[in-house]
Image: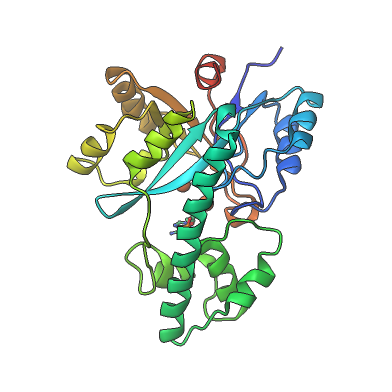
Amino acid sequence: MDEFRADLHCHSDFSDGTDSPLRLLRIAADKKLQGLSITDHDTLAAYTPELFLAAQKLSISLLVGVEISSGFEGVSVHILGYGSSLLDPKFLRVLKEVQKKRAERNLEILRRLKSKGKEVLEEELMQLCSSFQVIGRPHIAQVMVLKGYVSSTKEAFDLYLKEGGQCFFPGEKFSSLEVIEAIHTFGGKAILAHPHFFKGGDFLEKLLALPFDGYECYYAKMDKQREAPWIKKAREKDLLATGGSDYHGNFKPYIELGASWVGKETFEKLCP
Ligand code: AMP
Ligand code: FE
Ligand code: FE
Ligand code: ZN
């Protein structure tokens, strides 16, 4: 019997991944993962009855998950929500609100790009994204490459789209506390995604003072040495140490599904 491994962070083509949810399950099975959570940005659309059925056939435990954009002290913070109770239509309505704010922000980014002579039309974005439900900066970057404005999506981010970039616009977001509280109201677990992306010190301590259930200690290709202090801190704070690959398919071809994972004990704490 293979060791139980569950990748708790990846994206399908409902947001900014390039594999369908079903395809993600098949890749997970090929990689001998026994647990998976598909955590698209701001949507739970991947979780159809067909997906649960397919997971069952492949003997993969599927944990309902979503990665929600929030704001804390003007910084964008991604919060993972886990648990089947999040499929409640009232929580889906909360996600619709988040998606609305995202769509407004996208339009402002397009306006800013136009002002720099890098016009991307909404129709061009929609054409590329006909299979995507939630559109974000990676899709805008892709159109910029297709239009020849930049040579790679990396260049699009570095020059224009990254936080602080020429055409970046944060948009209005729910606060991190509001998102955590919404997840808790609907019986889910709230996990801070990739905390090592932030500069340390004061900001992170203040952020971690919010009522998170845990944070990601295992992430993408992070090595054991880098993981260790995060795991230690989680233990001290009595927080769950979770993780996953943050696989995005061809949008981030250097990261494989299953690059990071958690064991059975942690997995079961997220789906009691
Ligand atoms: P958005 O949700 O629209 O704000 O876009 C965030 C997504 O863009 C992240 O989840 C990553 O997939 C991607 N991303 C963020 N920063 C970069 C970057 N510097 N280079 C490439 N992709 C990035
Ligand atoms: Fe993403
Ligand atoms: Fe993220
Ligand atoms: Zn992610």
In this rendering, is residue 170 above or below 201? below
Pick whichever, 57 or 45, lies toward us.
45
Residue 217 visible to an observer of this rendering: no
In this rendering, is residue 196 above or below 8? below
Q: Position of residue 130 (x, y in %)?
A: 70, 64
Q: Quadrant of the N terminus?
A: top right
Which quadrant of the figure has residue 65?
top right
Q: Position of residue 221 (x, y in %)?
A: 50, 39
Q: Residue at x 71, y 43 (%)?
A: 21
User: From the viewer's perspective, is 243 left or right of 84?
Assistant: left
Q: Residue furthest bottom?
A: 117
Q: Residue at x 66, y 64 (%)?
A: 129
Q: Position of residue 140 (x, y in %)?
A: 54, 69
Residue 2 visible to an observer of this rendering: yes
Pick whichever, 104 or 32, lies toward us.
104
Pick whichever, 196 or 211, lies toward us.
211
In this rendering, is residue 4 above or below 12? above
User: From the viewer's perspective, is 172 left or right of 96?
Assistant: left
